[in-house]
């Protein structure tokens, strides 16, 4: 069955250092305003055009709606330029 993603498969452990780097780059790219909260998630894309794993960054600012940015790479492969490009429109 092509495109099936097993939700019960073992996932690799989260890379705390990579998440911290991404969080710092994202905060800096957004000007690190007071009340900024970020959620970083790596998900498997079921679309055949996707690279497999992609990373979503939810940006929550006090008093504003939550917005999302996507980087079509796994967390371990993301660099500062990827974050700057993904958050440029926010």
Image (spheres, rainbow, N blue to C red):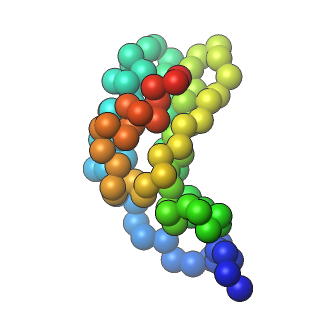
x%, y% of residue 8?
63, 76
Placement of 71 over or under 14, stated as above or below: above
Asked if residue 72 lies left or right of residue 46, the reply is left
| Residue at 59% over, 16% down | 62
Placement of 5 over or under 35, stated as above or below: below
Residue 88: which quarter of the image?
A: top left
- Residue at the extreme bottom: 1
Whether residue 39 can be seen here: no
- Residue at the extreme right: 1
x%, y% of residue 54?
50, 55
Whether residue 21 can be seen here: yes
Question: Where, quadrant-wise, is the N terminus in this rendering?
Answer: bottom right
| Residue at 59% over, 35% down | 68
Viewer-proximal residue, 48 or 90? Answer: 48
| Residue at 39% over, 37% down | 83
Residue 77: which quarter of the image?
A: bottom left
Viewer-proximal residue, 33 or 85? Answer: 85
x%, y% of residue 64?
65, 17
User: In the rendered picture of this protein, how many numbered marks are placed on residues?
Assistant: 0
x%, y% of residue 74?
42, 57
Viewer-proximal residue, 14 or 82? Answer: 82
- Residue at the extreme front: 49
Placement of 86 over or under 62, stated as above or below: below
């Amino acid at each position: 069955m092509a495109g099936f993603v097993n939700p019960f498969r073992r996932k690799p452990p989260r890379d705390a250092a990579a998440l911290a780097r991404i969080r710092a780059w994202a905060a800096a790219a957004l000007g690190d305003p007071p009340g900024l909260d970020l959620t970083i998630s790596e998900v498997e894309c079921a679309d055949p055009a996707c690279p497999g794993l992609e990373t979503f960054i939810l940006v929550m600012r006090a008093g504003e709606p939550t917005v999302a940015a996507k980087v079509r790479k796994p967390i371990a492969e993301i660099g500062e330029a990827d974050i700057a490009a993904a958050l440029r429109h926010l």
